Image (cartoon, rainbow, N blue to C red):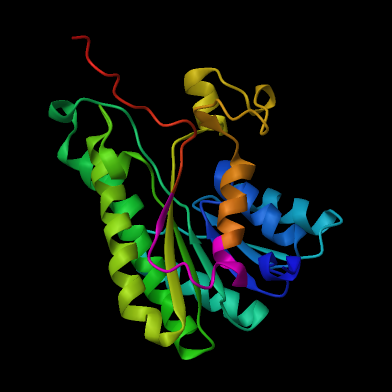
Amino acid sequence: MSGDRFSVDGKTAIVTGASSGIGRTIAEQFAADGAAVVVCSREQGNVDTVAEGIEASDRDGRALAVECDVTDREAVEALVDATVEEFGGVDVLVNNAGASFMAPFEEISANGWETIVDINLHGTFHCTQVAGERMREGDGGAVINVASVAGQRGSPQMSHYGAAKAGVINLSTTLANEWASEGVRVNCIAPGFVATPGVESQMGVSADDLDRDDVERRIGKTEEIADLAQFLASPASSYVVGETVTAAGVPRIDESPEV
């Protein structure tokens, strides 16, 4: 089996929420394999740093930084237009932009609920609809939605986030069916806890303390999610359509009750 099947060399990928954490690692890994990556977030300065790092490194790929609020339809259209103008098209879209905060359901304000759903679900809608139009007009492509295990089985004090991510998972399955005939594969990744800067600040767990060879873990590294994203963006996953791949380490199971 040729390793070329797992390559994204020569592809153009948009990665949202790419200023840090999972999104940044995905962009850097794609670029290292020869992809042209468009990195975006709500603050231009944050993604400028990422793009400049890629351009200054020995990575084979190129990078373009674009400021984009994924909840703003016009900003998303400008993002996709800039991608096509710079690189000629869109082959891969990684919907990674997201946000959350922890609170009991009864304490979440209407504004708080709408904000989280807007970023996580509506943002995915905007980016997928706009970038997907270019893919469908061209030679097809791959859409990779980053959801969460919270969207699969719920999570205490994360009802707003879990509901939005459940919507992303359902959207991925439905759209995979609708767009398959047009050469667009849609899949989803549902990470568990990943040692991003945000998780590190909340839980005190550093990625430097984790060994990828250690099977007995419930916290992963951003590189492990990037590996999945590259697989789903590559020809190697040609028969994977409409799936949600869970990456959450050792599963939690119910122990047998004592008799």
Residue 125 position within the rendered picture, expressed as x and y whole percent measured from the top left: 33, 65
Give the farthest residue toward the left.
106
Q: Is residue 233 magenta?
A: yes
Give the farthest residue toward the bottom.
137
Q: Please state if 110 lies on the left or on the right of 53 as rendered.
A: left
Q: Please state if 189 lies on the left or on the right of 171 as rendered.
A: right
Q: Is residue 85 above or below residue 20?
A: below
Residue 71 position within the rendered picture, expressed as x and y whole percent measured from the top left: 35, 58
Quarter of the image where the N terminus is located = bottom right
Say which residue appears at 45% left-offset and 78% top-offset: 184
Q: Is residue 246 magenta?
A: no
Say which residue appears at 34% left-offset and 63% top-offset: 172
Residue 121 position within the rendered picture, expressed as x and y whole percent measured from the top left: 31, 55
* Nearest the eye: 14 or 34: 34
* Nearest the eye: 167 or 64: 167
Give the farthest residue toward the front.
259
The segment highlighted magenta reads: 232-245
Q: Is residue 155 above or below residue 184?
A: above
Number of labels in the image equals 0
Say which residue appears at 74% left-offset and 70% top-offset: 4
Quarter of the image where the C terminus is located = top left
Give the farthest residue toward the top.
259
